[in-house]
Amino acid sequence: MNYQKPISSETLEAYGLRSGLEGSETRSKRRRWLIAGAVLIVAIMAVLWFLMKNGDTAPVSAGNDNSQAPTISVITPGRVTIEGTITATGTLAARREMPVGVVGEGGRVVSVAVEQGQWVRAGQVLASIDRSVQGQQARAQAAQVEVARADAQLAQSNLDRALQLVERGFISKADVDRLTATRDAARARVDVARAQYNELLARNARLDIVAPAAGLVLERNVEPGQTVSGGGTPLFRIARGGEMELLARVGETELTKLAPGVSANVVPVGTDQTFTGLVWQLEPTIDPQNRQGVVRIALSYAEGLRPGGYATATISSGTLLAPILPESAVLSDKDGAFVYIIDAQNKAQRRAVKTGISTSEGLAIVEGLDGSERVVLRAGGFLNPGESVNPKLQKPSGE
């Protein structure tokens, strides 16, 4: 049988191994102490760094609940004088539209001299109606005038001879009176025949459809060969002088701020052209359905202005004193536009506002602010009412 005996120190010493084992244990203990010391030093340095970083805010945190609040940029906008404007939309139309139709008895159109889009002068012939029958009637009446004139000359000659004979006693005074009446009747028949002739000439002249004034032809509703009559659909529509206007619809509240003579900039839909006009009339009635009135803005002729088109007008409504905020400060939701202001306790509070015109500096606030409030400049969408913040005041961009 084999028995194992424990190795004694004497045995290890005898073989020279005891001293080596003790050296290995000492080195292992020293390494552990070094590691523990290094960890302790790192921990102490971390604590010191944290205390140094927060040393400035430590006194504040003891007495101020905003120590952990976010820093928010705010602005005090004040009040500035800006040019007030009202934006409205409407339809373009001819300022003075002239419908031109048949004045006389009408007939068959033999020629049309103009096209829509052309300029015409006053009295220019636009279309002509056949007058072959009316021409013959005028010639016949002209002949009747000559017959009446010949009768009047004969009656005058008879009267002259009778006056010579009455002095000799060959003709009585009654005969002279009769011849005088005959002469006067003949002269009257000349006047009647001449008036009838002139009437026919006037009727024939109305067979030419002429422009009542100079302007721009907007519509042409007739073609050669068409039969037309008086009282029917106008054959032409002309914008007198080519003048246009915008029939802009404005709310009854804004309507009270306007007056004839104020300027307006008009931009037709689909273009980037701006046309300058003047308000020349405020219609006296308000639509009871939408509570709007019509502002008529006069415009000079321009190719970009087409009647029936849609346009937007920016109308000057005088000056106003109001705060101006950058667009980043104004938020909106289903309840309308609003901003966040910072109260005396450095807490965010929601404030409903009404915006006005947009300027190069921002949006004019016409209701809700007096300009002395501290308004959140940005990041208002991440705030909640009553939330504490650290406001950082910034100067308005205009200062």
Image (tube, grey):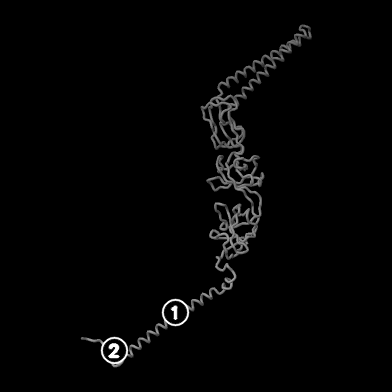
Q: Is residue 5 left or right of residue 75?
A: left
Contact (CB < 8 A) between labels 2 and 1?
no
Residue name at image x 66 percent, y 53 percent: 320
| Spot occupied by residue 338 in the image (x, y as percentages of width and height) | 58, 55
Q: Which mark is residue 141?
A: none
Mark 1, Cα crowd under 10 Å, few <14 / some 14-19 / many 20+, is few
Residue name at image x 66 percent, y 15 percent: 150
Q: Is residue 71 above or below residue 108?
A: below
Q: Is residue 214 above or below residue 150?
A: below
Earlier-in-chain disc, 2 versus 1: 2
Q: Which of 229 and 202 lies nearest the eye of the viewer?
A: 229
Q: Which of 184 and 376 lies nearest the eye of the viewer?
A: 376
Q: Would you name the residue on which mark 1 appears?
A: 39
Task: Describe the element under mark 2 as helix, strand or loop.
Answer: loop
Q: Amino acid at mark 2?
A: Ile
Q: Would you name the residue on which mark 2 appears?
A: 7
Mark 2, Cα crowd under 10 Å, few <14 / some 14-19 / many 20+, is few
Q: Is any atom of residue 298 visible in this view?
A: no
Q: Nearer the viewer, mark 2 or mark 1?
A: 2
Q: Which of 99 and 119 lies nearest the eye of the viewer?
A: 99
* Quarter of the rendering occupied by the C terminus: bottom right
Q: Amino acid at mark 1?
A: Val
In space, the residues marked 2 and 1 are separated at their CA atoms by 39 Å
Residue name at image x 28 percent, y 88 percent: 6
Q: Is any atom of residue 181 visible in this view?
A: yes
| Spot occupied by residue 391 in the image (x, y as percentages of width and height) | 59, 65
Q: On the image, which quarter does residue 178 sit in?
A: top right
Q: Which of 98 and 286 lies nearest the eye of the viewer?
A: 286
